Image (cartoon, rainbow, N blue to C red):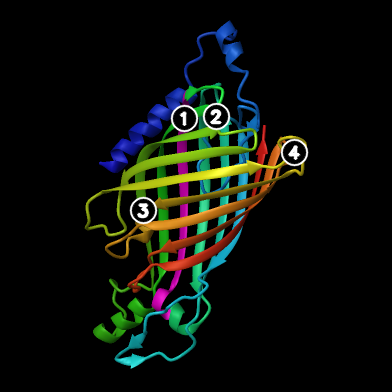
Amino acid sequence: MVRCLSALIAVLSFLIAFPPVASSQKSTGETADASLTPPMGSLGGHVFIPSSYIKDPFVRTFFRTGLGFGMTPEMVAPSVTIDSTPVVGSRGSLLFAVLDVEYQQAIRSWIAVRFRLHTLGRMADETPALIAQGVTLVSGFEFTWLFRLAESDRLTLSGSLGLQNSSVTDVYLQRFIEGIIQEGEITKANQLVQTTPTLRFGGGAHGAYAISTLTGLTFSGELEYGEQMDRSAPDKLYYRLAAAFDFDLGHDGGTPIGFVVGASTRTSPETETGTDNSSQTFFGRVAYTGNRNFALGLDLSYSLTPIRGMSEKQAFASAVVDIRLYF
């Protein structure tokens, strides 16, 4: 059902993006629509500072790249036993790398289309942690429509509707070795590398409020419905909530530096490992604000995320270099 609804949304999106052309001449209303939102999101004299951890509520055209890395500062690795024999070694940490590429095109002054490609690779730096957690590659594609719902001098509110297709490739050494020991051979069901795709569709509300020329508030809420990693399980509802305050120190001609502090909570198929599948993230950003045609910043985060084999959520610290070009 999810895939049928997703196909219908994709067809409707194509018809909206490329409507039939009735005439080669533009009407006066179409000419007015060409005056789109200024490159940098601004309300009430405050220029908002973006973050890679919260959705942008402004209808505008931009291109974004994000490249970063992270690790577990103090991972409490579960004991690893192979055929009742413990694997002895250093405790180890989980390491991961992140790559994001995103493009948003404003079609009219009130609607934009957004494409995003993201990849996350995770592995361990010691043998016990590597056996217990394996090597994981998560890649995905997002297609989203963003449309303005309301706007005033200090507040803008937008809605979104889109699809997300993710794929998890898992190299799980402990499962593979235990399967060989139990069966006495390598079977077709016991694969070292397993790839599981998940498809979801949903929507959300995103907003920004200018508290003053110095400070702004950005908030976002999303709901998605789609497949789980366990193919025998029914489709499920997922959520994401986020809010952030930003501070532009260069708003009155001062130092061109800005800061963002915020938090988010979410559920996703990639974190379905136990009774509490939600993850929480506290994030911040140090940004250069001296140029209104691009945004440059270092996004830092501290996350509590469930991982397999662990009774408690594990802490992850990460840093991402985020660059946006506005057109």
Question: x%, y% of residue 326?
Answer: 66, 35
Q: Amino acid at mark 3?
A: Thr
Q: Is residue 304 left or right of residue 284?
A: left
Question: Is most of the magenta stretch helix, strand or loop?
Answer: strand
Looking at the image, can residue 169 be seen?
yes
Q: How many marks?
A: 4
Crowding at dot 4, Cα within 10 Å, few <14 / some 14-19 / many 20+, comes out as few
Residue plotted at (30% across, 90% down): 83
Residue type for callout 1: Ser
The dot on residue 59 is 2
Q: Which residue is mark 3?
A: 267
Which numbered disc covers residue 308?
none
89 or 306: nearer the viewer: 306
For image coordinates 56% across by 35% down, the residue present is 104
Q: Alpha-carbon distance for marks 3 and 2? A: 26 Å
Q: Magenta includes 135?
A: yes
Helix, strand or loop at label 3? It is: loop
User: Looking at the image, is mark 1 or mark 4 earlier in the sequence?
Assistant: 1
The amino acid pointed to by label 4 is: Asn
The magenta span reads 131-149
Percent x, y of residue 271 = 37, 60
Give me the C-alpha separation between circle 4 and circle 3: 36 Å
Instruction: Please indicate whether residue 45 sits to the left or right of residue 74 in the image.
Output: right
